[in-house]
Image (tube, grey):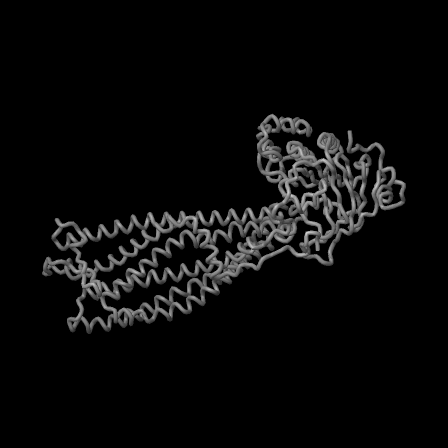
Amino acid sequence: MSSNGQDAAQPPVRAAARPGRGSLFRLLAYVRPYWLPLAASVVLMALVGAMHAMIALLVGPVFDRVLNPSSPDTPVPLVSIPGLGATIHLDQLVPGWISNVWTSVAFAILAVFLIKGLAEYCGTYLVNYTGLSAVTDLRQKVFDRLLRQDSYFFEQHSTAKLMSSVMSDIEKIQVATSHMLADWLRQSFSVAGLLYVVLQKDWKLALVSLTLLPFVMVPTLRIGRRIRRTTRRAQDDTAELNQVLQEALSGQQVVKAFGAEAFESSRFRAAARKLRSTSLRYVAQQSLASPLIEFFGALTIVGLLTYAREQIKAGAMTTGEFTTFVIALLMLYEPVKRLVGIHNIFQQALGASQKVFEYLDRDNGVREKPGAVTLKRFTRGIVFDNVGFRYPGSPAGFELKAISLEVKAGEIAAVVGPSGAGKTTLVNLVPRFHDVTSGALLVDGYDVRDLTLSSLREKIGIVAQDTFLFNDTIANNIRYGDPAAGDGAVREAARNAFAEEFILRLPGGYDAMIGERGLKLSGGQRQRIAIARALLKNPPILILDEATSHLDSESEALVQRALANLMAGRTVIVIAHRLSTVRRADRIAVLERGRLVETGSHDELVTGGGVYQRLHELQFWDETEPLLDP
């Protein structure tokens, strides 16, 4: 347990969201801020459903009056409202100057389709606006959550899989909450209107006709649950395919160097075929509902035709009335079939939401406590007080043990030791990339866990051996250290980092694009851009993690000069394999297997007979090598 009472052996994770009703309510919660356009779309879609029912109602007058020249020009009854004794006639829906039956029907048809079209257009736009806005908010929340996760989280999740969740999983949710939500409203109100038509025409016959629906709906719901599970597997397979793609493209030089194109091609093929298999399983499940509905619909129509022959012969029903009933029933089956498909797509969204909500529900292992203190300035120093650390989820793995070390303000402290000794792990505790599992790390007397993350990290600058630059202009990469900095400050930082000379030689100068991860620049140039970025940030604490280890002698000399400017007047913690670069440090800490085994100056340690002396002798230190200090 840490001194704050937090067990860092496992990152705190709340119970993962289960795909189902709870996930659906969580998705709908993102719609709540947009309730007004959603309510308007519901009203418009209800109007679409009413017009859909009117289309079925107009079939009767067409057969009984328009196509029957001998029919009288009396008002055409369309809808009878039981319980109210009211009947709506066609002439009540058209202007009074229209008296001819055909003209009335024609006008009604045009009006119904015009109203339906306008209402459907506006309603679809509004519901898509609602769905897209809600999903945009969800994607932003997931992205913000991922950005604030601790280092352990990113060690456990590949970049490709995280990108798949942010893009592919949320894309499934977006389809359900925008296009499919609009269709669901449209079809639901169409079903309601058409149900009223068939019940109003002959409610007994309607009930008999609809008794087959449960035989369709029950297996469909079961299929939906399978679709949810299949969708989750398909999304995981997509993430795996993305990972193979991302690794092969990012490491294309390694692939070429080892002649591994065929191997990577086989990896991609295997992942793609796995995704194909899962996707085909989804297609088979999704497509099963349609033939079920159509077959039972055909059974219903056969039964109705048999019944209608007898009713028409007996004069109990006209051809137009029966046609209206059958057309309405056929029209009813189509939106029911669409609703089944929409249900399955919503199941897809719920399956995709599982991983998204897992990310949202995962608490950050490095959290800012309520009432955290703002570190206004750094003046005293950094103290490792009996610090211990073990990587979360690795109880038998690497461990830092009982490290006590003080770095006073203005000092240069070096951390050296064999590979795997824990040097980078130790310095990563300072900006709280990880939290200590025992002891305490103090900055100016404050436990870093008691400080706000923003105020702590704004006091720290880092230049690592693997410099990360963005696919942006040189100026913007430098300005990342201080987004509010002007062009003059950017250029001054570049000059102090000895970078302006090569920058001005590039086409476009400071506006030159540097490619993904800065691949258009050499290693030394990338390091100097990173140093310029740190200079612009102007932090009082500086961490140098093997900042010159991958450079040739000429580039190293330039970077060393730039580092000298960067280090001036700052508290510096240097990690280095080359002991020649740290001999002027005020204090050298030697780590071995996670333990602090020696501390002292270079002169004290080089003849002390310990680990430092052994490392020094192995490296055949040359007095003429460039120093860290000018």
Residue 554, visible in the rendered structure: no
Q: Percent from the top left, x then y, of residue 440?
A: 73, 48
Q: Percent from the top left, x then y, of residue 246?
A: 59, 48
* Vertical position of residue 454 compared to residue 55: above or below: above
Q: Residue at x 37, y 60 (%)?
A: 338
Q: Residue at x 44, y 47 (%)?
A: 133
Q: Quadrant of residue 529 in the image? A: top right
Front residue (pair 507, 596): 596
Q: Residue at x 72, y 46 (%)?
A: 441
Q: Is residue 624 shown left or right of residue 435?
A: right
Q: Percent from the top left, x then y, of residue 517?
A: 62, 40
| Quarter containing the C terminus | top right
* Vertical position of residue 60 compared to residue 562: above or below: below
Front residue (pair 191, 23): 23
* Vertical position of residue 424 compared to residue 322: above or below: above
Residue 345, visible in the rendered structure: yes
Tally the marks: 0
Q: Quadrant of residue 465 in the image? A: top right
Front residue (pair 335, 603): 603
| Quarter containing the N terminus | bottom right
Q: Is residue 356 shown left or right of residue 468?
A: left
Q: Percent from the top left, x then y, of residue 91?
A: 15, 54
Residue furthest toward the front? 371
* Vertical position of residue 80 compared to residue 520: above or below: below
Front residue (pair 425, 101): 425
Q: Is residue 124 shown left or right of residue 445?
A: left
